Image: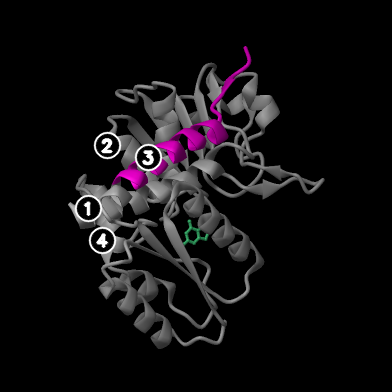
Amino acid sequence: MTAQLIDGNALSKKIRGEVAHRTAALKARGIQPALSIILVGEDPASQVYTRHKVNDSAETGLAATLERYPATMSQDELLARIRTLNADPKVHGILVQLPLPAHMDAKQVIETIAPAKDVDGFHIASAGALMVGQPGFWPCTPYGCMKMLESIGYDLRGKHAVVIGRSNIVGKPMALMLLQANATVTICHSGTKDLAALTRQADVVVAAVGKRNVLTADMVKPGAVVIDVGMNRDDAGKLCGDVDFEGVRAVAGWITPVPGGVGPMTRAMLLVNTLEATERASA
Ligand code: GUN
């Protein structure tokens, strides 16, 4: 058996089309959805990511502004800028690209963003809303994974989902979203004793560790859905995920590729959250 691919590029294209449509409807009412992105410092990966976010926005009709500041910017200056954006009714979403320079306190920076504009879903209020099942903003990566499961018509009710990784940005919110969809959820991490014994029981595995070959074919139940959040480089410098793709695809029922899987979905869900923030502010 060879697993079917869940194509993140195709699905994200469809979602971006829907965003463009809803954005046009808002514009017809005189509302321009707007996202402010703040980049502090010169981190090369962050420069690439923020450029993508600006381009994706422009393509769907959202107005994204990239504000770049030197790494020497003070924490107080950054907080003041965020407060100004919080108070600006023309700005619907605020995203501070991470990582921040070492002298800054990322936690305080994120908590300064108005929850109503927290399109990354990183604010403690967004995390709390997800935990108790109230409306808020879901972090883009696990939100994108849920959309991928939805796209194959997968009913999570009563299924066993195993999440490998417990970060605040992916693992923990992923587990809560799966739980909200009535899956039975196990969270595994570096302290888990027998990872393979747990993943072998899983109907759905989400690998979000940031390490190659965390999930291999012998760890997967035949027919399982495998979602690969990892973004790593192999020995040849080629992009790869956390899953041994070639091995696991021979066992799984569905699998997401890297690249072209979760990555484009993360980008698409930022647009969805920005649009949602605009619609809520304009209701
Ligand atoms: N750095 C890497 N990924 C992200 C992201 O999704 N949001 C922010 N704000 N910073 C990041």
Give SS at disc 1: helix
Question: From mark 4 to mark 1, how far is it between C-alphas?
Answer: 8 Å
- The residue positioned 59% from the left and 64% from the top of the image is 46
* Residue 186: x %, y % from top left: 39, 37
Question: From mark 4 to mark 3, how far is it between C-alphas?
Answer: 22 Å
Which amino acid type is shown beneath numbered disc 2?
Answer: Gln
Q: Which circle marks residue 21 in the picture?
A: 3
Task: Classify 10 Å Cα crowding around label 2: few (below 14), some (14-19), many (20 and above).
Answer: some
In this view, the residue farthest toward the top is: 1
Can see residue 202?
no
- The residue positioned 50% from the left and 22% from the top of the image is 224
Which amino acid type is shown beneath numbered disc 3?
Answer: His
Q: Nearer the viewer, mark 3 or mark 2?
A: 3
Task: Classify 10 Å Cα crowding around label 4: few (below 14), some (14-19), many (20 and above).
Answer: many
Residue situated in front as seen by the camera: 77 or 176: 77
Specify whether tag 3 is near ligand 1 (CB below 8 Å). Answer: no
Q: Which callout, 1 or 3, points at the residue further toward the start of the chain?
A: 3
Q: Nearer the viewer, mark 4 or mark 1?
A: 1
Which residue lies under the disc numbered 4? 116
Prevailing SS of the magenta stretch: helix
- The residue positioned 42% from the left and 46% from the top of the image is 269
Q: Which circle marks residue 280 in the picture?
A: 1
Q: How many marks?
A: 4
Q: Nearer the viewer, mark 1 or mark 3?
A: 3
Q: Which callout, 3 or 2, points at the residue further toward the start of the chain?
A: 3
Can see residue 216?
yes
- Boundaries of the magenta span: 1-25
Which amino acid type is shown beneath numbered disc 4?
Answer: Ala
Q: Which circle marks residue 180 in the picture?
A: 2
